[in-house]
Image (cartoon, helix red, strand yellow):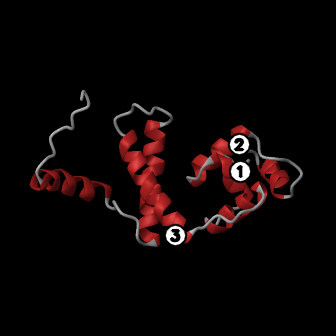
């Protein structure tokens, strides 16, 4: 077998690495709204640094925190089966956002047209919304 497991570190070694990481990050498990806000802010900072570079040294930290957010959202922000524009409306309400708050995803007029059903959500806008709300892009398509 060519895929031998790496040696497993001793629990004390893991603890010595984990505690400074946890202290630096502040929140490593999302249990409350405050934890959620803290981790989302950390993710936004990491996204600015990591971008789309999956090989960036911080990408795994970003994925770890995104998994924590996903677990919390799966429990607290269930996305209903709905039309893409209704999913967007729901997420905007959950996050307390207005149309103009999504300028990083699309112009306000486009968001308005999407919400009223006059326009569908393009793949590019779906990707931006997915990144903004930390959900899969296909919920908008």
The answer to which of marks 1 and 3 sits earlier in the sequence is 3
Residue, disc 3: 75
Within-10-Å neighbours for mark 2: few <14, some 14–19, many 20+: some
Within-10-Å neighbours for mark 1: few <14, some 14–19, many 20+: many
User: Which residue occupies 53% across, 64% down?
Assistant: 73
Above or below, 20 against 95 in this view is: above
Farthest front residue in view: 1
Q: Which mark is residue 99?
A: none
In what element is the residue under mark 2? Answer: helix
Q: Position of residue 83 (x, y in %)?
A: 78, 58
Farthest top residue in view: 2
Above or below, 60 against 74 in this view is: above
The answer to which of marks 1 and 2 sits earlier in the sequence is 2
Pick the residue in front: 8 or 27: 8
Residue, disc 1: 140
Farthest right residue in view: 118
User: Which residue occupies 50% across, 34% down?
Assistant: 52
The answer to which of marks 2 and 3 sits earlier in the sequence is 3
Check contact, mark 1 vs mark 2: CB within 8 A: yes
Front disc: 1 or 2: 1
Front disc: 2 or 3: 3
Mark 2 and mark 3: Cα distance apart in space: 26 Å
Residue, disc 2: 125
Q: Position of residue 103 (x, y in %)?
A: 69, 48
In what element is the residue under mark 1? Answer: helix
Would residue 119 be found to the left or right of residue 95 on screen? right
Q: Quadrant of the N terminus?
A: top left
What count of labels does the image hold?
A: 3
């Amino acid at each position: 077998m060519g895929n031998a497991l790496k040696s497993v570190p001793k629990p004390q070694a893991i603890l010595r690495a984990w505690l400074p990481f946890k202290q630096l990050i502040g929140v490593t498990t999302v249990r409350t709204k405050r934890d959620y806000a803290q981790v989302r802010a950390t993710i936004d900072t990491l996204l600015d640094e990591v971008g789309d570079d999956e090989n960036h040294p911080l990408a795994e930290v970003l994925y770890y925190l995104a998994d924590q957010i996903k677990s919390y959202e799966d429990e607290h922000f269930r996305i209903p089966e709905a039309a893409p524009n209704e999913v967007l409306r729901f997420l905007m309400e959950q996050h307390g956002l207005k149309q103009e708050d999504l300028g990083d995803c699309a112009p306000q007029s486009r968001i308005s047209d999407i919400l009223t059903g006059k326009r569908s959500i393009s793949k590019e806008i779906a990707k931006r919304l997915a990144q903004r709300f930390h959900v899969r892009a296909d919920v908008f398509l």
